[in-house]
Amino acid sequence: MLLKIDFESEMPIYEQLRRQIIIGIATGEVELGEELPSVRQLGGDIGINLHTVNKTYNILKNEGYLIIDRRKGAMIKDRLPEVNDDYMNILQNELDYLIADSKNRGIQKDEFLKLCSEFYDKLKYKENR
């Protein structure tokens, strides 16, 4: 998986990394059960602080995406996280913001829905339940 960090972005590096790993899982670039690079290796490869990578891995662990084993390192879980009320609240808040921001910028509803549909359709379907 090729990670692209925008050091000029307002989005924190750990969040960019988190999102790219989640997208990588959804697109099939990262397989369930796959071992991720060590904190040291990934930090060195993309030129970021080890604590930033560690923070990202811990967030993904808390979200249910990773298992962190002291001997094997970070691995994608064999089963992805389930939908729950907390996740639905987060999703609603993110969508509220994205839809409002898009509308403020002049993106029409049909164009927004088309973008959502196109991205969703290109994701690799995985039965994880």
Image: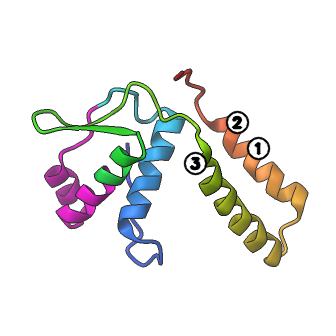
Which region is colored magenta?
35-57
Residue 85 placement (x, y as % from top left): 61, 45
**Residue 112 drawn above or below residue 24:** below
Q: Nearer the viewer, mark 3 or mark 2?
A: 3
Please report contact status of discs 2 and 1: CB closer than 8 Å, yes or no: yes
Residue 70 placement (x, y as % from top left): 12, 39
- What color scheme is it? rainbow
Q: Considering the image in quadrants, where does the N terminus appear?
A: top left
Q: Which mark is residue 53?
A: none
Q: What's under tag 1, amino acid-wise?
A: Ser
Q: Earlier in the sequence, mark 1 or mark 3?
A: 3
What residue would you read off at disc 2? 121
What residue would you read off at disc 1? 117
What residue would you read off at disc 3? 87
Residue 41 placement (x, y as % from top left): 16, 50
Residue drawn at (73%, 73%), measured in percent from left and top?
A: 101
